[in-house]
Every structure is written in C-alpha cells, then in structure tokens.
Amino acid sequence: MKNVDIIYFTLFPWDHPYSSVSFSLAKEFIKNNRVFYINPPYSYRDLLTSVNDKHTRRRMSDLLLHRMRYESPDQLADSPYSGQLQAVIPPMVPPINFLKPGNFYNNIRERNNNKLLQTIKKVIRDNNIKNYIYINCYNPFYAGSLPRSAFNPIVNIYQCIDDIYENSYTLKHGSYLEKMAIQNADITTVTSTELKNIWQGDAREIHLVPNAADINLFKRTIKEKFERPAEIKEVKNKIIGFVGNLDADRIDYPLIKKVAEKHTDKTILLIGPNNNTELAELKIDKMPNVIMTGSKDINDLPPYLQHFDVAMIPFLLNKLTKSIYPLKINEYLAAGRAVVATDFSADIRTFSDVIDIGTSHDQFIQLIDKAIAENSQEKVDHRVNVANSNTWTARVDQLWDIVGRKLSKSSISVPR
C-alpha cells in the first residue's frame, strides 16, 4: 500500500544488538513506505545503567535536555532505502514500574504517556505526515493505541509477541495495560497460536502473523565460506549450537547440562547474553566441552552457524514457552542447519517434517546424534525451502492484506 506512512512504536530499540520483530518488519516496510521508528523512552534509570553505551553517549545532550532526537540506524547505512526510515528517540521519563497499581501510578503514567504522544505529534508535524498506520509492538505501557479524535490514524495495530503474564516485570502493570491496548486496537496481531487463543476474546479483530527471518543474511551460511570464529578456532569435534538470550524463563538448563554430559565427544556452543544464575549454579559454564561467546550482533552469526553440526532449541515446557514461535527456528533453517527442539508449543510442532522434536530429555539427547548422522544435502535444501516461505517480506504482505481487508469493510478511504 503506497502513499501510507508507518508510525511504529515498539519495546525494541533499533540499536538493540539482537533481531526483533519490529525492526525486521520496519526494514521491509521501507521498501515502499516511510517508517518513523520510535524507540521506547529512556527512564532515568536506563540512562544511568547504560551511560557507557555508545548510543547513549551520542544521545546524552538531548536526553539531559529532554529533547526528542532523530537518528539514522547504522544497519541501514548501505541500504538503498535508508532514507525511508527515521528513528526517533523520545524525551526521558521517570521510571514507574516499581510503583504499585493505583492513582499515583496512573497519574505519573499519564504524564509519561503524554510525553510520548507529544513526540508523535511532533513527528507528524515535522514530516508532513497525512495518511499513516500506527503500530504498537508489545509496549502497552505507552500509547497502546492513538486516540482517533486527536491523531486520526488510518488504523491502529497492536502486535502481541509474547505472553505478558509470564514475566514478573511486565506482569505488574503490563497485564491490564496490554488488555486495554488490545481492546482499543482496530487490529491485533499475534505471533503464535497460543497467543491467539489467549486474546481472541478481547480483540476486535485478531490475526496470526508468525515470526520470520532475514533469509538472505542466514543463507550466507551455506553460500559463503567463513573462517572459524576465534572462540572455536581450535575446536576439531562436532558442534551442538544455540543462539539466543540465555534467560531464566525459557531455557532448560538441566537439559543443556545433560547434553554436555552425554555428548562429551562434542562441543556445546552457546551464543547470546547470559541473563540468569542457573548456568553458574549448575556449573555449565565450567564444563570442559562448553563454550560461551556472550552477545553477538545478528550480522555476525553466519560464521558461527556455518560450523554448527546441529542447532538446538532447549526450551522449557511452561506457560510462557507454550506461546512462543521462536525467531531462531527460521534463522536456523535458512542457514540449512539440522535442528533438535523440545516439544514446547503447537507452533514448533508445525516444523516436525524438517526438525527433530524431543518429548523428553533422553529423547532430545538421542536425537542429536540422529540429526547429525542423517544430515544430507537434500535435507539442507528442504530446510531452506521451508525458510523461504517464512520471510519478513511475506509477513509485510500479509499485514497489508489484513489492513486492506479491514479498510474495505470500513468507511475509511485507502489513499492512492
């Protein structure tokens, strides 16, 4: 849909080191539309904890003076569409999530929310925005939807990408704020079957729009020849790899320990930030065949994936993971990697013809050898073909189709 701009407010900053639904979709939208990508506001606490971050240092004067800031994302520097996306850094706000629900929280939240709404109004004025779609990606704490009387978006979309009830930080206020955002949105999209089940009673209109992958980036794994990264330069045996956030809520650490214990002839390579204590408590980080690289930029992943003999998704089976369609599944498949996963959700089971799914720890461990032994070029090709149907381009096409059908049923005219 041309002649329509996108105002995209999200929980995930453009400068976040890992892939996100919102920035991945934004990079597709800009091929035909202007996108104004609004980072979540810094709180005073965020400023203090990230004072040494290069992006924070660059923004420091604007943050301290409570000024809005425009930026051009580094990742798009070589893109022919770079001018189509402007990133927006809103003014700082006081942190309030620690407050109890009630009038005091509501009053300060309203002030914070008004700061963001004023930012959006300024973006609209500065850029002469006339016809636009507003998308809020999983940040119901601010501007869950835009009031039509004051902003008049063509359509309000709320993107739900996780079960907000299953995180102690977001649960405190996010549970009722997300419900309000979904009830007010014209369209709600969800990334998993379980999330659709959770929210279909509250949404005016709800659609399943699963996660996808930057297929061309991950295809480099099979199209190019990379040197072994420094962390695995001396590794000569098979590699069982994982890429992702090593958090406390999703990862089955006892399973990872068992994998390392049972596959002593292989190296366990864990790529991602360590945001839990269980790795140390179980002494996984001290095991001789475990290598942890820490965080890696998404663009640096292909050389690591190229040396995976099998990729794993060792998720816990709980209420949170039941609602997950993981970004990494299509990234692994686009890279042609064999995959072994736990049986954590209905959506992961839709990949059962191209991955191995273990329903117990013992079966998961056994399937690793099976996946390595039965790997073939035919299977690599099949995985890539499956990934080819799960691109961000396809997801943007799906979103425009949803919006088009919504508008065809309403009195709102579609700009030409």
Image (tube, rainbow, N blue to C red):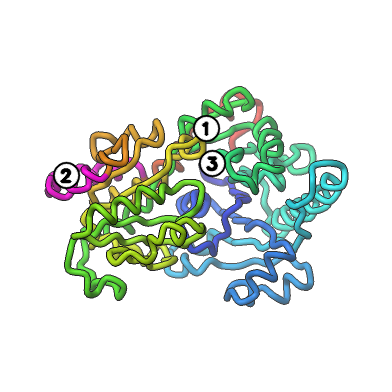
Please provide the residue range marked out in magenta: 365-390
Residue type pointed to by label 3 = Asp
- In which quadrant will I find the C terminus? top right
Q: Which element carries disc 3, helix, strand or loop?
A: loop
Q: Which residue is mark 1?
A: 195
Marks 1/2: CA distance?
Answer: 32 Å
Residue type pointed to by label 2 = Lys
Side (left or right) of 49 relative to 162: right
Quarter holding residue 64:
bottom right
Residue 375 located within the stretch drawn in magenta: yes
Residue type pointed to by label 1 = Leu
Q: Which mark is residue 162?
A: 3
Rendering coords of residue 400 (x, y %): 49, 38
Rendering coords of residue 379 (x, y %): 16, 44
Q: Which residue is mark 2?
A: 370
Q: Which element carries disc 2, helix, strand or loop?
A: helix
- For marks 3 and 2 on the same chain, the one whose residue lies earlier in the sequence: 3
- For marks 3 and 1 on the same chain, the one whose residue lies earlier in the sequence: 3
- For marks 1 and 2 on the same chain, the one whose residue lies earlier in the sequence: 1
Most frequent secondary structure within the magenta stretch: helix
For mark 2, does the 10 Å Cα neighbourhood hold few (<14), some (14 to 19), or many (20 or more) residues?
some
